[in-house]
Amino acid sequence: MAERIREHRHQHVRVAVIGSGFGGLGAAVRLRRAGVTDFTVLERSDSVGGTWRDNSYPGCACDVPSHLYSFSFAPNPDWPRNFSGQPHIRAYLERVTDTFGLRPHIRFNSEVLSARWNTERLHWEIDTASGPLTADVVISATGPLSDPRIPDVPGLDTFPGKVFHSAQWDHDYDIRGKRVAMIGTGASAIQIVPAIQPDVERLTLFQRTPPWVMQRMDRRISGLERRLHSVLPVTATLRRGLLWGVRELQVQAFTKRPQQLGLVEKLAKAHMHKAIKDKDLRAKLTPDYRIGCKRILLSNTYYPALARPNVDLVASGLKEVRGSTLVAADGTETEADAIVFGTGFHVTDMPIAERVTGAAGHTLAEEWKDGMAALRGSSVPGFPNFLMIIGPNTGLGNSSMILMIESQLNYAMDHLRQLDVLGGTAALDARPEATDAWTEKVRQRMKRTVWNTGGCTSWYLDANGNNTTVWPGTTGEFRKATRHVDLAEYEVLRAPARTGPEPHPAAATAPATAATASSPTPTTPTTQPTGETAA
Ligand code: NAP
């Protein structure tokens, strides 16, 4: 281990990828396919999978059909169900890692502590938990759902029982026979509730805002279908195409004609009526905002679980904890042995932004103090050669994020191609005016979407009420917008060709090791970044 860390001390790579979830692994595959082998994937944990590694709570599954929620370049004819569970998705990502020979590229236990742009040498200086490295290009694939958010509830530290977040499920804790308080009613909570309800003594659900929940059209994919997909891969492609096409048509109602969603609300209400016979409970569970404004949830087991006698619904948020007593905003008091927070993630304030410092010496978080924005969801002015996967306004309300990830990978690969064409040491820095124009276009289109007009607050909106997370169009439109890097939207930064690797500043202060002693003598080329306008 120590040897490996020493080896890393002077590593310079063409591309450093941050994260090994769908985004990071996808980037690694695409880099290899583009003939780039000089890259490293930095992973903070000890295995791949990202959100599908971390979220292992009971009932965890994907509500996008698996034949669409998978890479186009790595079809899996063997998906067992329409909507696969977390273990299957995680296993799929492990298989992708092995099939495409990605493991040698991955540095596990290598959380990125900081990344700083060197304006003279035109590269990124990255410090990680396993040592520093430098990279010409950074592809940041940290994902929006990677850092759990636990609300700052007064008195939480006085709670004597067990507390954990849905993304950090403690499988050693025996929940059977316990009085459990579930906080939140988002996509995670509605999967957890029916999964643990039969085992716990009492389940109290703290609901601040009721979600719209629809029937989940789930079923086992038969052996015959799977064999067919295996023998005739075109059938799996057709299946994927159909799943994609239906969602492309549906999205118009979300983005352009939210009034059409009234019919969908009727279906969701009928779904609730079937399971919830108690009128008062139905009233508490009925949302007062347009369906789709928050993510539409899919479950056939959530409402039936709420109707069970060992479940209580508190139609109010958790406000305070006093020892083992949980106090809701409406004053309801509940005794509990365990609290499970299904309270979501740091989406609009992603922690990696605080660790990335651009050309002007300020962090991405500072750059984004008034809200996240990026050219085509990928690049931010002043952060050259830094490309995001699932950047601002690339999220989806109704389809597969893998489609958006693959679009952003197309863009990142074209960025690398453009650098190759430019030759020498060069970097591309998004122009502020191009970024502003893109952001304005997104904002204009956002105005009439259900996410902005539906009468709810959601994690799609930032602290200023701006929607900086969702893409207000079809996945096809985003694919088109990210097919190529338009050099007119970038400033080309140049430096003379490098003649040898330069030690990372952190390495220079590290104790001398065999690796540092034998590393080549650093050279300091007289770099002179020159703004160059490309046609
Ligand atoms: P989330 O959607 O952000 O939901 C957080 C929940 O916590 C909301 O219901 C929120 O209420 C509630 N909350 C926050 N503070 C509270 C308090 N003090 N008291 C009571 N409730 C409180 O988080 P999530 O469920 O983890 O889902 C996050 C995202 O992960 C999803 O939107 C989805 O994109 C993804 N996900 C996907 C799947 C899938 O099947 N593909 C499954 C799970 C998660 P308010 O609504 O009032 O804010």
Image: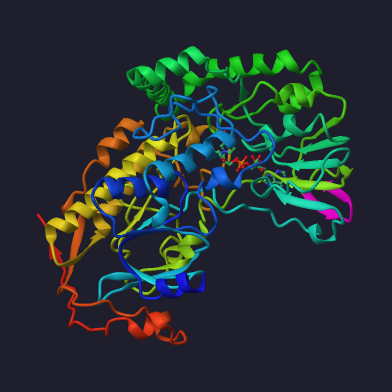
Residue 432 in picture, x, y percent from top left: 27, 59
Q: Looking at the picture, tell me which residue is in the foreground, 202 or 93.
A: 93
- Residue at point 71% right, 13% down? 274
Q: Looking at the picture, tell me which residue is in the foreground, 184 or 41.
A: 41
Give the position of the C terminus as an image quadrant. bottom left
Residue 365 in picture, x, y percent from top left: 46, 63
Residue 94 seen anywhere in this rendered image of the structure: yes
- Our reading of the magenta stretch's main secondary structure is strand
Residue 505 seen anywhere in this rendered image of the structure: no
- Residue at point 64% right, 31% down? 211
From the viewer's perspective, is 459 left or right of 366? right
From the viewer's perspective, is 24 left or right of 500? right
Q: How many marks?
A: 0
Q: Quadrant of ligand 1?
A: top right
Q: What residue span does the magenta drawing correspond to?
A: 319-327
Q: Is residue 321 above or below residue 265?
A: below
Q: Looking at the picture, tell me which residue is in the foreground, 232 or 444.
A: 232
Residue 482 in picture, x, y percent from top left: 27, 42
Q: Is residue 2 magenta?
A: no
Q: Is residue 359 above or below residue 439?
A: below
Q: Is residue 404 above or below residue 147?
A: above
From the viewer's perspective, is 162 left or right of 405? right
From the viewer's perspective, is 340 left or right of 85? right
Quarter of the rendering containing residue 193:
top right
Residue 534 in picture, x, y percent from top left: 12, 58
- Residue at point 21% right, 44% down? 484
Q: Is residue 507 above or below residue 57?
A: below
Q: Is residue 321 magenta?
A: yes
Q: Looking at the picture, tell me which residue is in the foreground, 477 or 114.
A: 114
